[in-house]
């Protein structure tokens, strides 16, 4: 464990979510088989690969595994994965760290949870912290974590930033909580899902946030009538000071529609790939929600937003900030539960195929629910399909 941590902290030639070829085939190194589900798509048969009922899970995460992000790099020519995940004890959530050499067998860090809730009752993250997204600045050897924090007696769920030299010891940003949308430039409000891609000294930043029509909401009925999730684009060099683009990059398809992403596109995962035409291209996997609903807590008067019909979609663009188009109107066929609970994808292009990690719901041999992470493999779209 110590060796792996040292290697993770010292490398400066880190390529975050870029295409990787000529790797060992995952089929040859994992214990279980992949089952074909549709059109060349495969799902790993021994799932979840990481869950709240693992023998190594701590009491702080026994109630459920939530949002997560994965950083992937090379160690001696082999893939190496770092998982940062949200774990819940039932009354609160914190953030843990785990390592893997194959993406399937994980070792939790002994110091978990590595990022904890705020200690002060006035802290914006006093009740919960949850992973938004991760990135690594190879020039500075610095991990960046963007996360959501909740204080149930204050302003609800807000956005925070933290940095670490090793992924274990974290410094929360002095400017927390951060609100990139406070000046009203974007149509979005409250960052609740994101992805960051480090390129040329800065971070491309895609965010999923709530969008509504009008000047706000007065009651749950008004919110329910117009609330949706859309994805916007930001840019930052330091992780806390953002340049916000007004135009959205990917939008829901239409309220009360029948499509899988009718009322929400959220929690993006972006990587780059240069194809046969030697033209760099950006690819995005995202959570699509058929329905978004809201309810008001009678005690705190805060609005809680829920989503239904959760599936995964895919889009592509030649630019990080514009021109994003869906590859299909249908969702990806990943759905372990069979009940449309797949969300929060994290994708890597390896050996000509897309490796997709995502949250889903599972059941043990007695039918008891398990909260965890699944793994699927997707065939990569041909360049002709983009024409």
Image (cartoon, rainbow, N blue to C red):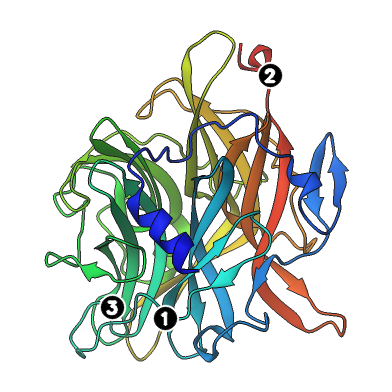
Q: Residue at x 79, y 76 (%)?
A: 363
Q: CA distance from mark 3 to mark 1?
A: 20 Å
Residue 260 disc label: none
Tell me the element at label 3.
loop
Q: Quadrant of residue 344?
A: bottom right
From this view, report whether residue 322 is shown above or below residue 86: above
Q: Which is nearer the eye, 365 or 215?
A: 365
Q: Are marks 3 and 1 in contact (CB under 8 Å)?
A: no
Mark 3 or mark 2: which comes first in sequence?
Answer: 3
Residue named by callout 3:
125
Q: Which is nearer the eye, 98 or 90?
A: 98
Q: Residue at x 39, y 41 (%)?
A: 14
- Dividing the image into 4 quarters, which one contains the C terminus? top right
Q: Residue at x 31, y 49 (%)?
A: 188
Mark 2 or mark 1: which comes first in sequence?
Answer: 1
**Relative image position of residue 92 (x, y in whole percent):** 43, 86
Residue 111 disc label: 1
Q: Which is nearer the eye, 345 or 263?
A: 345
Q: CA distance from mark 2 to mark 1?
A: 44 Å
From this view, report whether residue 188 is shown above or below residue 115: above
Residue named by callout 2:
382
Q: Is residue 366 left or right of residue 265?
A: right
């Amino acid at each position: 464990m110590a060796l792996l941590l040292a290697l993770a902290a010292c490398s400066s030639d880190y390529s975050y979510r870029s295409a990787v070829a000529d790797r060992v085939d995952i089929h040859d190194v994992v214990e279980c088989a992949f089952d074909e589900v549709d059109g060349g798509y495969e799902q790993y048969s021994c799932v979840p690969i990481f869950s709240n009922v693992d023998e190594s899970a701590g009491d702080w995460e026994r109630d459920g595994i939530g949002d997560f992000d994965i950083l992937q790099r090379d160690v001696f020519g082999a893939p190496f994965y770092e998982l940062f995940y949200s774990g819940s004890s039932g009354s609160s959530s914190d953030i843990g760290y785990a390592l893997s050499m194959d993406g399937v067998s994980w070792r939790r860090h002994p110091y978990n949870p590595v990022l904890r809730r705020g200690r002060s009752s006035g802290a914006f993250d006093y009740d919960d912290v949850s992973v938004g997204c991760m990135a690594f600045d190879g020039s500075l050897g610095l991990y960046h974590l963007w996360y959501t924090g909740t204080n149930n007696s204050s302003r609800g769920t807000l956005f925070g930033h933290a940095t670490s030299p090793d992924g274990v010891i974290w410094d929360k940003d002095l400017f927390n909580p951060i609100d990139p949308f406070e000046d009203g430039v974007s149509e979005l409000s409250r960052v609740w899902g994101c992805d960051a891609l480090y390129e040329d000294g800065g971070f491309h930043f895609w965010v999923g946030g709530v969008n509504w029509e009008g000047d706000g909401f007065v009651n749950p009925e008004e919110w329910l009538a117009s609330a949706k999730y859309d994805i916007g684009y930001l840019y930052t060099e330091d992780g806390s000071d953002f340049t916000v683009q007004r135009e959205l990059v990917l939008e829901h398809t239409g309220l009360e529609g029948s499509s899988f992403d009718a009322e929400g596109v959220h929690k993006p995962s972006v990587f780059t790939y240069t194809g046969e035409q030697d033209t760099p291209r950006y690819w995005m996997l995202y959570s699509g929600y058929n329905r978004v609903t809201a309810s008001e807590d009678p005690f705190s008067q805060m609005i809680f937003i829920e989503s239904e019909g959760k599936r995964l979609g895919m889009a592509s663009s030649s630019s990080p900030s514009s021109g994003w188009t869906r590859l299909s109107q249908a969702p990806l066929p990943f759905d372990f539960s069979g009940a449309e609970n797949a969300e929060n994808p994290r994708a890597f292009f390896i050996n000509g195929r897309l490796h997709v990690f995502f949250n889903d719901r599972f059941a043990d041999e007695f039918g008891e629910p398990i909260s965890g992470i699944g793994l699927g493999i997707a065939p990569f779209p041909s360049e002709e399909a983009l024409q």
